[in-house]
Amino acid sequence: MLTVHSFYVEVKKHGTHDQQSHAGGRGGGAGSVVSYNKNKDETLLAFMDATRTEQRAIEAKYGKLSPHAVASGYSPEDEKKWFELERQYMNASEMRADNDQDFFDEAIAMKSGNSASGSDFGFEDERFDAIRDEYVVPDELTLKTNAGLRRTGRVTTKVQRFDSMVEQGEVQNPTRVYRAAILTPEQTGKLTEGSSFVDRGFQSVAYDRGGAEMYMDIRANNISGEKVMFEYTLQPGVNAVNVGYGEIVVQRSAMVSILGVTKTGDVTVVQAEVSKP
């Protein structure tokens, strides 16, 4: 059985691998694609959960009080163990943050020169935080804005604000992301290998496939249609920014070139490249 200690050793060892040894690899080599190291993130999360479980077990011996509590009555051994577990937990949390930064620093260059993984998402100033909130928080309104763009192409002042935000970042290495959609059979039928189209709306994509799958299932419960998972490779030069919640926003009017179409269960899987038009 894997103990917390051996799990921590394995996490540290796992963290010394460069991402080329994982799905997709990192930028820098011929034909390499930057992809999020989900295996590392899941390993770290599992370790953190195990660490917290051990801490809670120690706390239960003392009426669920942490060593910081007044007169908690911890034995020296339990107090030392609790704080060691806390140290390991915080180290793992920092490693998760580093994993995110590794991905974004390879994938997206921000105008500000800051990392897209930062608390400010690498934007130049605070006004872009407000635009980000306008895009991310009122989800239904953003869906309507994109539907209007795809239907008419009409550029409103809101669209211009979103443009200014997305122009803050640019893809610097081929990058793997995922976009889930629920489409009509007619729309799905047009997704054929060798074809291409320009998407006049902004595209919200996930750098973790699991996040895209979750969104697809939610949408499938609310609207009728066929499940489609786009496996995109964003090409250098495409404007894109991190907006949090596992989401990257890709510029409107990007060119989508389809490389292959397969079927997995009830999901149509489309491999495609996304580039400047």
Image (cartoon, helix red, strand yellow):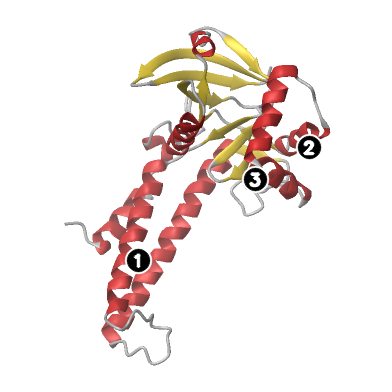
Q: Amino acid at mark 3?
A: Val
- Between 101 and 270, the one lying in front of the other is 270
| Secondary structure type for disc 2 | helix
Dot 3: few (<14), some (14–19), or many (≥20) neighbours within 10 Å? few
Of marks 3 and 2, which one's residue comes earlier in the chain?
Answer: 3
Dot 2: few (<14), some (14–19), or many (≥20) neighbours within 10 Å? some
Task: Spot the residue most to the bottom.
Answer: 71
Q: Position of residue 2 (x, y in %)?
A: 20, 57
Q: Amino acid at mark 2?
A: Arg
Tell me the residue that label 1 is attached to.
Answer: 52
Tell me the residue that label 2 is attached to.
Answer: 161
Whole-angstrom CA distance, mark 1 to mark 2, is 43 Å
Whole-angstrom CA distance, mark 3 to mark 2, is 15 Å
Left or right of residue 77, residue 91 in this image: right
Q: Quadrant of residue 236?
A: top right
- Between 171 and 127, the one lying in front of the other is 127
Rendered residue at 37%/21% (across/down): 266
Tell me the residue that label 3 is attached to.
Answer: 137
- 195 over 43 or under it: above or below: above
Is the residue under label 3 in contact with that under label 1 (CB below 8 Å)? Answer: no
